Image: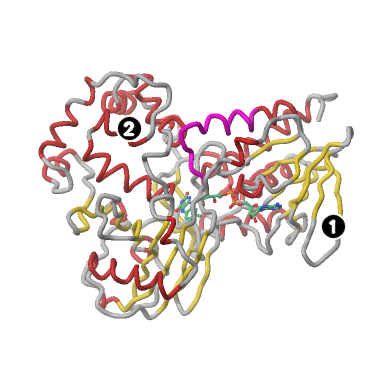
Amino acid sequence: MPDIGIIGAGISGLAAAYRLQQQGLSVQVLEASGQTGGVIQSESAEGFLIEHGPNSIRAGDAALETLIDALDLHEDRVWANDVADTRYVVRNDQPTPLPRSVGAFLTTDLFSARAKLRLLAEPFIGRAAVEEESVARFTERRLGPEVLKYAVAPFVGGVFAGTPDTLSVRHAFERLAALEDEYGSLLLGAIRRALTSNDEETPDTPSGLFSFRGGLQTFPSALADALGDCIALNAPVHALAHDGTAWRVTVAPTDAATHTRSFDALVCTVPLHRLSDMRLETSVDLSPLGDVTYPPLSVLALGYERDAIDHPLDGFGMLVPPVEDSFDVLGSIFSSTLFPGRAPEGHVLLTTFVGGARAPQHATSDAASLQGLVARDLDSLLGVDASPVFRRLVHWPHAIPQYEIGYGAVKNTLNALEETHPRLAFAGNYRAGVSVGDALASGLQAADRLLGANEQAGQPH
Ligand SMILES: Cc1cc2nc3c(=O)[nH]c(=O)nc-3n(C[C@H](O)[C@H](O)[C@H](O)COP(=O)(O)OP(=O)(O)OC[C@H]3O[C@@H](n4cnc5c(N)ncnc54)[C@H](O)[C@@H]3O)c2cc1C
């Protein structure tokens, strides 16, 4: 029975390990930190349930649903409140609902009449003259400057903690670039796809945002429980080398002696900013991997008495576009509106994000200075007139990989590594999307790749 090592117990590593174990292979997960789940961490304190990392997962993927079935998590799952379809974007210092229908678009104050008319020109705009464009250039060219400023730029801040000027549309928003490639127009392409999509193909797959009663960490914890005692915590991997027969993995815990383990195959899910510190013996040039930016991000969860806030908090949250530069926060999630059980009776929970690629200088681990900055913005935008009764600050020095212009070199390097070493696979949020669902899918793909290599006897390492 081949012995497979999985490096990293984030969602991608746990998903890969689970799939391989289900296929009867022997797996060993090596995790550097003292817990599983990677950035997915939930905490209950003083009646509040806070998320240190991701807050929600988007349903709709059949493999994700199969996993939730297999782990028997349906009873624990909680769906986003219906009002969470409303997302506020700040314009002229006011949180303004992002329109969700043609009627709402025509009457919204978020876009000027000129911006609305500009959209009508979209089907007549030609394809890009250059191979790779930034998200900003692409959006401005196709949809006009206001859609960039008040829809796409805040969205990019919310998803990547990034800026549209540096991200590559082809790598960060593959589906948008594909609409232009295929149909020559985003609007016509979206309409054509909606008309031709066959809903009967996935009749039972639910859609919408979800979490779990005990927070998102329920998911990786259930995977870890199902995997049993094959997870080694506090086991940071420092080096990988192939000795002609097996992969030799060097583990160097701080409180124990360095030791080496052998595996027939490996799945590596270490974030790229950590991978560059690891010794990996290969003929492939790894330098593009070390160039990927992971900006810092701070997450401040604040609990208030409900009466302390004027705003109805009737939505998913609010995003602050960079153009509204009197504010410093990237945006806030109305956490206690989004999911039940996030705050004690009579209280609300807001989760605010600061820093990212837009303003890395504001991301700090100093709670007092961050709270001053956040309190000023929340007071001005939501009408908060009392001190929080609860606060928790989480600082991520390296939050989310930025799929910047030239990211193709990163993807090519990872593909070259896998081609050169068929028994080494890579998974994680740097492969094909940064969401929890994307990271999980990449873990399953890495497992399938090794299962395929396993069937082909006599493969090189
Ligand atoms: C603040 C924040 C908010 C987010 N919000 C959302 C959201 O609402 N919805 C959404 O879908 N996505 C969200 N994301 C993105 C998503 O959560 C992540 O992209 C995804 O969970 C990453 O999973 P992963 O397995 O690729 O990596 P990670 O979770 O980073 O796991 C990698 C693991 O590898 C371990 N490791 C590192 N080095 C070594 C080593 N040398 N040896 C052994 N182990 C090692 C790490 O300790 C870690 O456990 C958010 C991310 C952040 C940071």
> Could you say where residue 259 lies in the image, as x and y percent from the top left?
86, 55
Judged left or right of residue 412, residue 117 is left
Q: Is residue 239 above or below residue 82?
A: above
Quadrant of image for the C terminus: top right
Residue 412 is one of the magenta-drawn residues: yes
Residue at the (36%, 35%) spot, across then down:
135
Q: Nearer the viewer, residue 44 or 233?
A: 233
Residue at the (39%, 64%) spot, across then down:
351
Q: Which residues are magenta?
A: 401-415
Residue at the (69%, 36%) spot, across then down:
425
Task: Tell me the element at label 2.
Answer: helix
Quadrant of image for the N terminus: top right
Residue tagged 2 = 137
Task: Tell me the element at label 1.
Answer: loop
Dot 2, how many residues are within 10 Å of its Cα: few (below 14), some (14-19), or many (20+)? many
Judged left or right of residue 412, residue 461 is right
Judged left or right of residue 447, residue 255 is right
Color theme of the render: secondary structure
Task: Identify which amino acid the numbered label 2 is placed on.
Answer: Arg
The picture quadrant where one finds residue 286 is: top right
Task: Identify which amino acid the numbered label 1 is placed on.
Answer: Thr
Q: Is residue 139 above or below residue 88?
A: above
Residue at the (40%, 25%) spot, across then down:
178
> Could you say where residue 151 lies in the image, as x and y percent from the top left?
27, 44
Judged left or right of residue 123, residue 227 is right
Residue tagged 1 = 258
- Lower sequence index among marks 2 and 1: 2
